[in-house]
Amino acid sequence: MIKQILSKKVFAIYGLGNVGGSIAAVWLRAGAKVIGVDISKTLLTEIQDGISHKKEPFLSETFSKSIKNKSFFLTSDGIDASKRSSIKIIVVPVGLKNKKVDLSSVIQVTKNIAKGLKKGDTVILSPSVPPGTTEKIVLPILEKESKLKGEKDFYLIYNPERIFEGRAVKDIEENYPAVISGLGPKSLKIAENLFRIISKKGVLKMPTLAEAEAEKLFEGAYRDVNIALANELAEYCEKIGINFWETRKGANSQPFCHLHYPGTGVGGLCIPVYPRIIIENASKFGKTMSLLEYSRRINDNMPKKCVDDAIKMLLKNKIKPKNAKVAVLGLGFRGEVTDTRLSPTYDVVNEFLKKECTVTVHDPYIFEDTILPKSVPLTKDLVTATQNADLIFISSDHKIYSKLDSKSFSKGKKSILFFDGRNVLNPKLFSSGMLNTIGIGKN
Ligand SMILES: NC(=O)C1=CN([C@@H]2O[C@H](COP(=O)(O)OP(=O)(O)OC[C@H]3O[C@@H](n4cnc5c(N)ncnc54)[C@H](O)[C@@H]3O)[C@@H](O)[C@H]2O)C=CC1
Ligand SMILES: CC(=O)N[C@@H]1[C@@H](OP(=O)(O)OP(=O)(O)OC[C@H]2O[C@@H](n3ccc(=O)[nH]c3=O)[C@H](O)[C@@H]2O)O[C@H](C(=O)O)[C@@H](O)[C@@H]1O
């Protein structure tokens, strides 16, 4: 039955990145025909050649198989894709430009979709957006361009994607209920029928589009504030000489406490961005979001705080920061991702450069980068990155780093100091005084 429904539907997915690529794979795995739309010709070629999305399980193999059996077509022509599809899913990025929400990609794609919109079509918006975006920005563009009426001639849905990079397909298919909302009851019914096909955890119907848009932002705001709390409590533990990590275990041993992890900063296109989307939107209604603003300030200061602590460690070991060799491990915005957007490591590197240190960056998954200063080499070879280093600074929690010990490094004449900004190292494997970890009390 489901296969029959889907075999008649053609989906067009606009934006084949971490999220859009995963959504395309999920619908292909469910038996739908999919037109993948992206402006990046490089990405389209990589997908065609079966070498894209290497860090996301199931995607590359699903794409190759679907291209072969002619259920997956790739194009950069968003208007034609809209003409040839009945369900259009928008998954292009929504970021910040000078702390203002940037909806330009969403608007551009919506205009393309509108030029091919037909009676009976369904449009689904998925990126995280300010409450009101679907109804007040996307709907008017669709109606004006197509001369069709929402909820009468076509259907409009907001479905916030909640994937965690590295397990995106399973998150959509198994881990999370699909949050859905519609312009009206008909749109909502279509959303329910569609998302029940792919989501084993079922659907969570929100009363309005705006509440669905807001819930996604609230998830991120909750996380950012709790990370800020962990960062502030970790600094408190350092001051009074107790161990945050042990204290956290105790506090989290009851179901109402979920202390997060302190770290070298908060990166990615999501958690640092969602609170700012709320802050900006709230200001239009005369509301100041003091807690969100303060949490952002704490988290944005973490790279500087951690580098300052690492510099103190160098000085305590009679090593002058000027020309000290520092190996920064982890360029991804968090462990096990190749995504460097808003990675705290960029700020960590700049703080070390301000102290005139010599910096090398290591990452096991990222081989090229256009943002790091030219004076800072990027390498995937740990020995190259750390040879003759005075200090090793762990900035992202890639799994590989948790296996390191003091013998993992070239036997230079001097002992190496470690600042573990993600608490991934095993202190038992390091002699005392060599290792400083965030939140570990007096060092
Ligand atoms: N990355 C994540 O973990 C999650 C992200 N999100 C939301 O999803 C949005 C997208 O995130 P990602 O997939 O990570 O972004 P991404 O940058 O990996 O992918 C976006 C894709 O859209 C393409 N694109 C940009 N403008 C386009 C246009 N006008 N027409 C067609 N294609 C266009 C880009 O070339 C890129 O391939 C984010 O802004 C965020 O709001 C939601 C949940 C998780
Ligand atoms: C509420 C929530 O947990 N959202 C998840 C989050 O995933 P994301 O890929 O952004 O990773 P993340 O684990 O939140 O990390 C974001 C940043 O925060 C840092 N981080 C994270 C957790 C923590 O306790 N301490 C900390 O410092 C990470 O190192 C990273 O730099 O954001 C995704 C999103 O919305 O895009 C969302 O789908 C994911 O489920």
Image: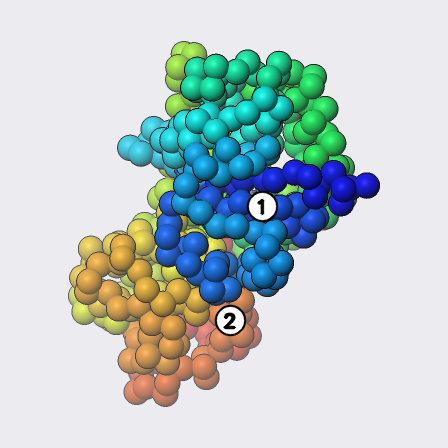
Residue shown at 51% from the left, 22% from the top: 134
Task: Give left or right: position of 231 versus 370.
Answer: right
Q: How crowded is mark 2: few (under 14 residues within 10 Å), some or many (20 or more)?
A: few
> Cβ(mark 2) to ligand 2 < 8 Å?
no
Sequence order check, earlier mark of 1 and 2: 1
Q: Could you give the CA–CA distance between mark 1 and mark 2, rounded to whole angstroms?
A: 36 Å
Q: Which residue is labeled 1 in the image?
A: 34
Quadrant of image for the C terminus: bottom left
> Residue 73: where, in percent of width, then height?
52, 50
Three-letter code for the amino acid on which mark 2 is drawn: Ile
User: Camera-side residue: 370 or 187?
Assistant: 187
Regarding residue 414, the answer to whether it shows in the image is: yes
Q: Which residue is labeled 2 in the image?
A: 400
Q: Is residue 222 above or below residue 354?
A: above
Q: Is residue 53 above or below residue 78?
A: below
> Residue 313: where, in percent of width, then height?
33, 64
